Amino acid sequence: MIDFNIPPFVGKEIQYIEQAVKNKKICGDGEFTKKCSRWMEERFQVNHCLLTTSCTHALEMAAVLSGIQPGEEVILPSYTFVSTADAFVQRGAKLVFVDIRPDTMNLDECLLEDAITEKTRVIVPVHYAGVGCAMDEILDIAKRHSLKVVEDAAQGVGAYYKGRALGTIGDFGCYSFHETKNYSMGEGGALLFQEEEFIEKAEVLREKGTDRSKFFRGQVDKYRWVDYGSSYLPSDLNAAYLWAQLEMADEIRKDRLESWNYYHERLEGLERAGCIERPFVPDYADHNAHMYYIKVKDLEERGKLIQFLKEREIHTVFHYVPLHSAPAGRKFGRFHGEDRYTTRESERLLRLPMYYQLTREKQDQVVKAIEEFYE
């Protein structure tokens, strides 16, 4: 059996979890939580990184910090995970979906300006597969219209746009450390931002609406309920698991890139023959090999290929059903313009097995099975 995903494990995770237990500090903001946050701040050159219980919660925090109010509009791609939308729906926002680019599967920056109304407050670019959106154009539009930019960089940890880490370019960036991601803590995420003006409110928001962070730093003699908040702080046990992988981040990235490149080389012949399309990575993007996907002819062919591979014990998956076609998408939002690519391309895309320490032998089995299908 070739699994689609195996959560990353480098060997020191259990040791660090035991250390966290011995520290007698297994709730949030312990030794490992702080280590992970500092590592990302230094590595990705961002002023503030707050570890969270999930990327969903990081997005929720970003929605609050963006000041979105009921009835205001948020522009985002329909081709994304539900959390991207949910975070803003919870604040009473109206979703405005725009079409994607068929080359990168990212939000089409050329369609943004036409989707902006007097109610627009936030743009949410989603960096699909760790390949950055066209951030210069997006930021220029946002600046001219006084809009906030919240990067959904769930898949973008360790990927870059023109030398800048994804998640550090807009007003807020959100990471995921789910078990399917390049670096994992089981369930977890992070909120990143540069501006000092947001740190106090972000800490209060993350600590159930209290100034508990100030209390532990000795800045106040007791902590109080001061504003709206929730429990967005992860256990130090989870952070201990993540820390082992961040120590090995370069090795994990190198390993995944080698697997990505191997797929890319082996599948070139099928693309030349017109059977599939391989991923496209623009010159400005330094991706992180989060996933390897192929595009087939249509939905029917994809279903047949999935079944063909399943019979050979190879687990593959497709990705999002476009949000604008879902019941909640129709309830909370609208699609602006024409759906030229979102639905069509989503029905063609198939994700291949991809994880840390995926062997060449297994990759060969995957490629040979796909070749056999097209023969």
Image (cartoon, rainbow, N blue to C red):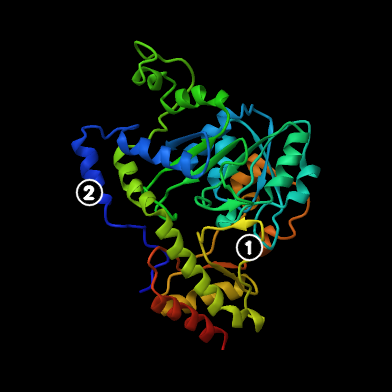
Quarter of the figure with residue 170: top right
User: Are discs 1 and 2 less than 8 Å apart at CB?
Assistant: no
The outermost residue toward the top is 221
Residue 285, percent from left and from top: 62, 57
Give 55 or 315, whichever is nearer the viewer: 55
Neighbour tally class for label 1: few under 14, some 14-19, many 20 plus, Cα within 10 Å: some
Left or right, 165 with reference to 273: left
Give 304 or 373, whichever is nearer the viewer: 373
Left or right, 89 with reference to 237: right
Residue 240, percent from left and from top: 30, 43
Quarter of the figure with residue 112: top right
The outermost residue toward the bottom is 375
Q: Is residue 188 visible?
A: yes
Residue occupied by mark 1: 281
Give 268 or 270, whichever is nearer the viewer: 268
Residue occupied by mark 2: 15
Q: Identify the residue shown where x is 58% and y is 29%.
A: 195
User: Disc 1 marks which amino acid?
Assistant: Val
The outermost residue toward the right is 114
With respect to residue 296, does 233 lie above or below?
above
Q: Is residue 320 visible?
A: no
User: Disc 2 marks which amino acid?
Assistant: Gln
**Where the N terminus falls, by quadrant?**
bottom left
Residue 309, percent from left and from top: 46, 77
Secondary element at tag 1: loop
Residue 145, percent from left and from top: 77, 33
Q: Identify the residue shown where x is 70% and y is 58%.
A: 101
Left or right, 123 with reference to 240: right
Secondary element at tag 2: helix
The Cα atoms of the two marked residues, 1 and 2, are separated by 38 Å
Give 265 or 342, whichever is nearer the viewer: 265
